[in-house]
Structure formats: C-alpha cells, structure tokens
Amino acid sequence: MHAQTSAKTSSNATDINEKAYARTEDGPVNARGDLQIDRHKDGESTVLEGKSDDEFGIDWLDPGPDARNPQDWSVGRKWMIIVLVTGITLIPALMSTAFAPAVPLLMQDFDSSSAALASFTVSVYVMGYCIGPPLIAPMSEIHGRAPILHIANVAYLVTAVVSAVSNSLSLFIIFRLFMGFAGCASVTLGGGVIADLMPPEKRGVAMTAWSTGPILLGALTCACFLFLKETYGPRILARVADQKRRETGDPRYKSTLDKGQGRTQLLRTALMRPVKMLFKSPIIALLALYTSIINAYCTILFATIGTVFEDEYNFSVGEGGLAYFGLTIGFVIGQISVGAFSDSYVKKMKAKHDGQIKPEDRLPPLILGSLLLPSGFLWYGWATQEHTHWIVPILGSALVGIASMFSYLPVQLYLVDTYTVFAASAIASNSVVRSICAALVPLGAGPLYNRLGYGWGNSVLAFISLGFVPIALVLLIFGERVRTHPRFQPKL
C-alpha cells in the first residue's frame, strides 16, 4: 500500500503543498520537507509511533501541530533563526568585496604591480564558493543544518583573523580562499533553512530578510550556538528515533524517512545529488548559467568600481568606497521590491489556480531583471566614458544592483519551492557554476577596459547579457512543462 500511495502521488506532481516537485528513490517530497508516505496518529505524543506496517516508525504528528516540526514552530522562533542566519550570511557576502577599494594599498604594501593579481585578490574569495557548496549542502542533509553552520562560523572567524595579519600576499590569498570556503556555508544553507521553516506563500519576505541582515559576526556566532536549533526535518526525526532506541534499548525504532542506507552509501548519494541536479535537470542548468552571468558582472563592478572612480574622477581611497553606494541602494530596492511582490503574487496565483502554487509563479521579476541588467551597464559605462558628473555612473550602477536582485532572488525562491527538502543541494549546484564565473570572469575586466574603454567595454557586457533575455521568457512560459517531464526528474 505504501508503494502504491507514493506512485499515485508522484504521478500528479503539481501542488507544492500536497504533491511532489522532487523525487527520491523512496517517493516524492512535499512542501513540509517530508517524503509522502502513509501517516499514523497518536494523540498522546508529538512524534508518531506507527502501529501498522512499521510499528516502530518515527514520524511527525498528523494532523499537527507538532512541536518538533520546524514548520509548526511559533512565528517568533522561526524569525529568530532567520535573523541569525541572515546575519551570518551578510558578513561573508560583504567580505567578498568590502576591501576592494583598498586593493591598490594592498598591492603597494606587498610590492606588487600586477593588475591580474590585484583582481585575483578579490575574486579568489569566490573560488571558495566553488569548492564548498558541493560538500556542505550534502553534509547538511546527513548531519543537519545547525552543526555545519556552527563549524563554518568558527572557521570563518579564524581564517578572517589570519588573513588580517598576513605578512605576504601569497598567505593573504590562501586564507582569503579559506574564508570563502567557510563563508559559503550560510549562503548555501540559508535557502534550505527557510524551506525548512516557512510555507511557500511566506518565503518571499523571509528570503528578502535573509538577503539583508545585521553585521557583527563574532556576536552572531555566539548567538547561533545559543539559539540556532536544528531545522532539517529528516535529521530531527533521526535524532528522536536515536533517543527512543537509547531509552528503550530496542533497535527497531527508526525514522520513517530512513532509507536504510549505510553511512558510506548515504554520503555517496548526498554528495552526488547536486551533480545530478546540475546535469540532469535543464532548468537548474539554465538558471545556473543565467545567475552566473549576474554574479560575474556584479563581481566585475565590485572589483573595479573603486579604482575607476579613483582614476577617472580623482576620488581618494576613502571617497572611492562611496562609489559603491549606488550598488548598495540598488540591492536594497531590488530586495524590498521582489520580497513584497513575490508573496502577494503567489497568493494571487494560488487563489487563481484553486489553491495550487507553482514555482514558476516566482519568476516574473526575472523578465524585468534581464532587461535592466544591460541597461544598467550601458548607462554606467558610457557615463564613465564621457566623464559626466560622478552621480550619473553611480545611478547606472544602482540599476545594475536592482537588476541583480530581480534575477537572483526569484531563482533562489524557485529552487527552494521546487526542491524543498533538497533545497540546499539545489542551491549548491547553482552556486558552484555561479562562483566559478565570479572567480574567473573578472580577471578579464582589466584587459577589456584597457582595450575598449569603459563605454564599449561595458557595452560588450551588456550585449552578452541581452542573450539571456530569451532564457527568462522560456523559463516562464515552458518551465513547468520541462520541470514536470519524467525525463528531467532525476532520482535524488
């Protein structure tokens, strides 16, 4: 009966709340992050102890609420965790480019005049984002989110201190790479934590908050150890089952989500999951390609905009930092706009589609973002080339910031809504491609601007990005058909 129920459910995979968007070897995954299986009831306990096919199965209480299920936690508890994850996400994001205005001083201190090496000191950080996600996301699906985040927070603090006291350029670059590796944990797992906690119609605001956040990493690391609790449902049930086995001495208690795999097999399956998603799902591949362009272009601006204003507008190093003001304002405007629009639009579509929510309902801002990105680069490039007032190119960079959020956030929400329990792996597969481009593409920015100038150099970037406008349209129009096609649903 269990197998029949899973098969029947997976054949009608259209509703996030009730039906499957991702498949595992045991059946579909629903929006609560649970495999859809036969449920049992026990009014006395918050964890089910089944009495039919599997007498010792540990599952959520159904009907709920279940105090152990993160989706049933209080609003205050959920938002406390989101705020903590938001804070520890912002610090690595800021550190990827925060010291870019001081790169000339860094190169002077270490007696280096290499333009490529100067750009590499910025982009090497993002290389850690290439290495980390394929390891961190699967490990979080084995050991849970909280332990991985705790370890990463401590590692980030240590590597940041070593980078700050480096006495050579090579040592600085090596530990900046390690900083990126440790810092990518919160970026990789943040979407998964939100999927663990929030229903689809409330994820837009939560994702927007996660993209903003407070600033003090040391205090936040301590706060995470005190208040950040495990949110990954399968891991919570596994712990409850383990506690039952210790209390009763009966080894038959196990989570209903336990596949019965050995640790080695489980690790191998988890590590291969992001790879399967990237190469067997054309939707994830297209989204990874598109967001990689967005990320690479933003990294180019972060790595060069301070120097551009110092050279072209005679800004000092301190004043060069103000050149980032436009990008920052653009990011904030984009985050607020997408967050406000996304949840309200999803609720509207839910009512229109008889209570069903589709991941494609997250994608309309992607169309506007794909048009704003080339417009922003044309504005910024030619305003700089013609030496207009300094505020004009800064306004152009603000348009780039808005465009990046109109593209980045909808993609993250789409992946979270589609893969729920495996959201961390989906985001990891996207992050790897995105980070490779962000690490390597900016190395060519210097030669590009030297040969073509800021006007035509940024025009080339704009023309390339125009080629991705059809991708956004194809995803919006045909995305559901491709996503639900059996050929493109890898077993996870």
Image: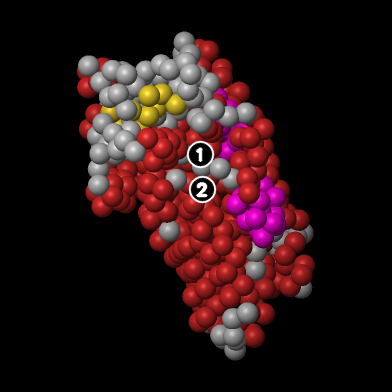
Label 2: few (<14), some or many (≥20) within 10 Å?
A: some
Point out residue 68 in the picture as x, y percentages from the top left corner. Answer: 51, 31
The answer to whether residue 96 is above or below residue 420 is below
Q: Which residues are magenta?
A: 198-225
Point out residue 376 in the picture as x, y percentages from the top left corner. Answer: 61, 49
> Which quarter of the figure is the N terminus placed in?
top left
In the image, taking residue 70 as reference, residue 215 lies left or right, namely: right
Task: Give the mark, 2 or 1, whose residue is nearer the N terminus.
Answer: 2
The answer to whether residue 192 is above or below residue 22 is below
Q: Magenta span has 420?
A: no
Q: Residue furthest top?
A: 354
> Which quarter of the figure is the C terminus placed in?
top left
Real-space Cα separation, disc 2 to disc 1, in angstroms: 8 Å
Residue bearing mark 2: 146
Query: What type of secondary structure mainly makes up the magenta span?
Result: helix
The answer to whether the residues at label 2 and label 1 have Cβ atoms under 8 Å apart is yes
Foreground of the two, 390 or 269 = 269
Dividing the picture into quadrants, the one containing residue 57 is: top left
Amino acid identity at mark 2: Ala
Judged from the image, the secondary structure of the residue bearing numbered disc 1 is loop
Residue bearing mark 1: 231
Amino acid identity at mark 1: Thr
